[in-house]
Image (cartoon, grey):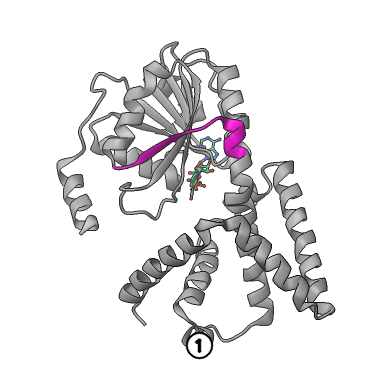
Amino acid sequence: TMRESYASENDSGFKCLKPDLRPIVVVGGYGQLGSLFCRLFELSGYEVRKLGSQDWGRADELLSDAGMVVVSVPIHLTEQVIAKLGNLPEDCILADLTSVKAGPLQAMLEVHHGPVVGLHPMFGPDISSLAKQVVVYCDGRSPESYQWLLEQFQIWGATLNRISAVEHDQGMTLIQALRHFTSFVYGVHLAEEDPKLEQLMSLSSPIYRLELAMVGRLFAQDAQLYADIIMSSPQNLAMIKRFHQRFGEAIEMLDTQDKEAFKRAFNQVEHWFGDYAQHFLIESQGLLRQANDTTQR
Ligand code: NAD
């Protein structure tokens, strides 16, 4: 299986594409995502140092000969931490793993005059392998000096997608902020309604179990991270308010029992999805078959 082949790859390590790189310093390297990347870099033979929140007293010592610095601290602290990195070697690569990109990228370009790249791994620390996972990156400065890094991610199994920081943040308004927020509200609603979760699951179709899983997994993770992601930009809030407004409009159809309006809206959306509606129906059938095969209870 995928998991086993990853385990054996770990034992033998991954190929190292930049053996002459000076030490990699991961700021926030004791955190969830930071420690995952530390492990991967170590497995590939790089020398890795962690710079945690208590280590700023010896930051100069840790950073003076860094070949690459990767920032992986909580979002709300990212820009102020980046601002402390003004003394890196000229040829050092400065990168970050933040879930938002425009602000941190700008801060990195301002503080450091060498190579800069913004990274957003589209996965959390709970994955067992980078196989088929996506890493989004935003070019900052001197891309030729960090091509090896992007290739290293590919050796770990990841797929890379390049995008501008602004477009990234716009996309994340829907993909992260709105989606996590609706999961959050659904969780709040469930907790208030207080149904018996066991019973709910026994009554569920596989697709509803998946929905429960998608909502429930949010609450197994870090509240600060999701507060930061959802509230990271005014455009997120504006998007969420538009959604709220449409929710209200849709409820009006129910209040007036307007099934014709409901069907008109339904058909408009169907038309908007186009061929994708059928595509998603088939794709979800495949996912549900897999979910059925692996569900324990
Ligand atoms: P985390 O809280 O687990 O880790 C952050 C680490 O930074 C902690 O160890 C904390 O002690 C440390 N830290 C705090 N202040 C510091 C300082 N001043 N100097 C040095 N270290 C400091 O958070 P995480 O989930 O690993 O997230 C880190 C980054 O990764 C965030 O930018 C987040 O957006 C990004 N990210 C997280 C996920 C995820 O699912 N967890 C996914 C993609 C991207």
Query: Residue shown at 31%/30% (left/top)?
Result: 151
Q: Quadrant of the C terminus?
A: bottom left
Q: Is 165 within the magenta?
A: yes
Q: Is residue 164 left or right of residue 68?
A: right
The quadrant in which residue 70 appears is top left
Q: Is residue 68 left or right of residue 191?
A: left
Viewer-nearest residue: 272 or 174 = 272
User: Farthest residue in the right direction?
Assistant: 256
Viewer-nearest residue: 16 or 214 = 214
Query: Residue shown at 38%/16% (left/top)?
Result: 144
Q: In the figure, 146 relative to 41: above or below?
A: above
In x, y percent, where is residue 142? 45, 15
Span shown in magenta = 157-169
In x, y percent, where is residue 120? 48, 39
Q: In the figure, 33 relative to 289: above or below?
A: above
What is the total number of numbered labels drawn onto the structure image?
Answer: 1
Q: Is 60 within the magenta?
A: no
In x, y percent, where is residue 28? 47, 38
Viewer-nearest residue: 176 or 18 = 176
Disc 1: which residue: 203
Q: In the figure, 176 relative to 263: above or below?
A: above
Q: Look at the image and tell me whether residue 65 can be seen.
A: no
Q: Is residue 292 left or right of residue 194?
A: left
Mark 1 burial class by Cα count in 10 Å: few <14, some 14-19, many 20+: few
The amino acid pointed to by label 1 is Leu
Q: Quadrant of the N terminus?
A: bottom left
Q: In the figure, 211 relative to 32: above or below?
A: below
Q: What element does badge 1 sit on?
A: loop
Q: Look at the image and tell me whether residue 255 can be seen.
A: yes
In x, y percent, where is residue 73? 52, 39
The yes-or-no answer for disc 1 within 8 Å of ligand 1 is no
Query: Residue shown at 47%/67% (left/top)?
Result: 281
